[in-house]
Amino acid sequence: MSDSPITPAHEHGLEESKFWIYVQIAMLLAVITGVEIVGVYLPFAKTLIVTSLIVLSAVKFLFVIFIFMHLRWDKAFCTILFFIGLILAGGTMWALLKLFGADASRPLTAARNDSPPALTLPA
């Protein structure tokens, strides 16, 4: 007999229950994705839609990292390192978007003085 209190049949039951938890979480993530897709086409204010999309994406992100990446069961130090990297990546992305993004103070259709003259065909 084995000295461990967990029998192989009991281990199989634990694996099966974890499998169904993963399936349920995957279904929840699919539903959240469906809500995001439908939400884009609803006639609400742009700020409300963007805010709700950010919140729903953050919820999906947290589910994935804590459940599927098993971050919930890792040491706290590993979690802190993960979030430091995430903050650095987000800050870098924000800085690059601000640096190379479109200038909001100038309309996109405004004619610029440094543009080359239009070519005309001879008659």
Image: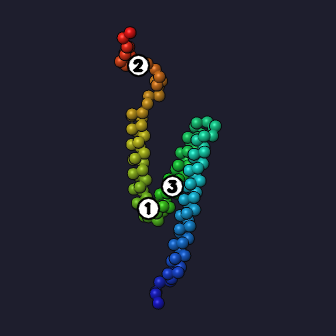
Task: Name the front one of labels 3 and 1.
Answer: 3
Task: Name the front one of labels 3 and 2.
Answer: 2
Q: Is residue 32 left or right of residue 81?
A: right
Answer with mark 3 or mark 2, whichever residue precedes in sequence.
Answer: 3
Residues packed near mark 1 inside 10 Å, few (<14), some (14 to 19) or many (20 plus): few
Give the secondary structure at mark 3.
helix
Residue 42 at x, y percent in the picture: 63, 40
Q: Which mark is residue 76?
A: 1
Amino acid under disc 1: Ala
Residues packed near mark 2 inside 10 Å, few (<14), some (14 to 19) or many (20 plus): few
Mark 3–mark 1 distance (CA, rounded to whole Å): 15 Å
Residue picked out by circle 2: 112
Mark 2–mark 1 distance (CA, rounded to whole Å): 54 Å
Task: Name the front one of labels 2 and 1.
Answer: 2
Residue 54 at x, y percent in the picture: 53, 45
Residue picked out by circle 3: 62
Placement of the C terminus among the 4 image quadrants: top left
Mark 3–mark 2 distance (CA, rounded to whole Å): 45 Å
Q: Which residue is nearer to you in this view: 34 or 11?
A: 34
Q: Is residue 31 above or below residue 101?
A: below
Amino acid under disc 3: Leu
Amino acid under disc 2: Arg
Q: In the picture, residue 117 is in which quadrant? A: top left
